[in-house]
Amino acid sequence: MSLDFGLMLEKLPEILAGLWVTIWVWVVATALGAALGFLVAAARRYGPPPVDWLLRLLVEILRGTPFLVQLFLLYFGGPFVGLRLEPIPAGLIGLTVYAGAYFSEIFRAGFDAVPRGHVEAAQCVGLSRSQILRRILLPEMTMLVLPQCVNMAILLIKETAILSIITVPEMTMVIGAIGSQQYAFADAMFLLALFYWVLVEICGLLGRIAEARLSKFRFAA
Amino acid sequence: MSDTAPLAPRASTAETPEADAAVLVRGVTKRFGDTEVLAGIDLKVPTGATTCLIGPSGSGKSTLLRCIAFLEEATTGTIEIHGDPLGFAEAPDGGRTRLSPQSIRAVRSRIGMVFQQFNLWPHMTALGNVCEALVTVRRMRRSEAEEHGMAQLSRVGLANRAKHYPSELSGGQQQRVAIARALALDPEVMLFDEPTASLDPELTGEVLNVMRDLAGSGMTLLVVTHEIGFAATVGQRIAFLDHGRLLLDGTPREVFGEPRHPRLAQFLETYLDRGAAALV
């Protein structure tokens, strides 16, 4: 190892600042992306057919192109159509939209997985469509899609690294820069990988705890 | 209505006064694509009595019940709940006009439905399932709803399971919670769609007992069932469907007594084979 850990320690405030950006951008983009995905899935399910087609097209484009390319288009292409964004807002918006596309597909499958009878039972006691959505479909679906959502959140932690390309001062950019300055790029990347891995493990652990706590709501039948 | 001969069922609905009909089905047909599931049903479900719909699989009995619950829309024909049209009203020109969603929900709220698959909401406790509509639809205060909900759970003998989730209850208990959920809204008619068909035989009894109590309390029940013994002993009216037609409609004595309609005899044989002769 040629990496000077003493110097790394010196750079700790910078590294922690980068870690903090990674975490908050990830948490916010995941939360907003999940909310967006739910709205898209609901609009596709309940909206008129043209809305479904349009949203489907958008989802297909977002899933069919690399996140890196989407981010370039947003950040560097945006100004050509009058959309001038700072790195962090651009990264946040890009990641949220990208996440939203995937989450919408998870929720679409989730809607279909809720037994029709549960909705019929709600109709029979007089719940309105929006009440059924909020009180029955959303909670039941959440339990069903939780594992996929945790998986998606894990993928998104790692996608935040791509934000370094548009100079979002997150962990990859900060640690990468330190590594370059010290001619110890490989060692810095190793350290970086370790950070991501720990974050992913924490995320997975939280997911398992959530699943365990929800297990008593599992389908009886 | 009891003077109707068992082999001439249609006349009974047309000629008796309709004032005491909890559910009045007139000329209901149902098609799924090219398949005609109901081929013109006229049925009167008397108030305060238990009517059992029996018939072979695919005879359309569940579809008829689902039309009455408005979970399926009849292709033609009308359904009235205590004189109020459900979903469609007869137009002066003989056709049907669709009623407003508000009207549909208002009439529908007078019907309680119990499903073969229970359909409890897994993320709510037994009490939560029973109280949900009281709070969200009837706008009751939570405390008031829970008090009312507990009374319903007591009625089906499950007050001590109020805080349990569906996954923590047996099938029979789940179905009793589902009955309590429907009862909580004080329906004028309770519909049961093969309520014991997905239960082990030993759990069937507890559900049938609850239904017997309801029948005894003078509630109007319409039960689609394969429990011929229950139909014969608790049912006050028996309707026998075959191939989407109402073949027989009368008292158990009229329907099950000799001479039996050949289709019914053939249908009952499958039960008699299994040793249920004593019940019938």
Image (cartoon, coloured by chain):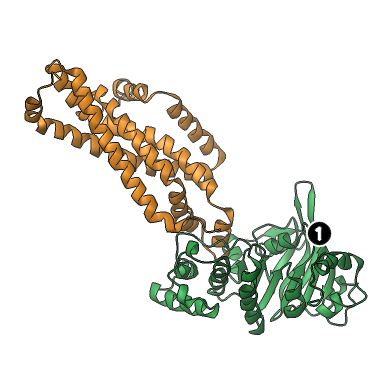
Which residue carries the number 1 mark?
Answer: B244
Residue depicted at 84% across the width and 80% down the height: B253
Q: On what subunit does the disc labeled 1 rest? A: B
Residue depicted at 56% across the width and 76% down the height: B186
Residue depicted at 29% across the width and 25% down the height: A162
Residue B20 horizontal/vertical position (percent): 73, 80
Q: Is residue A212 above or below residue B112?
A: above
Q: Is residue A110 above or below residue A179?
A: below
Three-letter residue code for mark 1: Gly
Quarter holding the N terminus of chain B is bottom right
Q: Colour of chain B?
A: green
Q: Is residue B10 left or right of residue A175?
A: right
Secondary element at tag 1: loop
Residue A63 horizontal/vertical position (percent): 44, 29
Residue B131 horizontal/vertical position (percent): 47, 70
Q: Is residue A3 above or below residue A23?
A: above
Residue depicted at 31% across the width and 31% down the height: A158
Residue lying farthest to the top in this orientation = A183
- Output the letter for the chain in orange: A
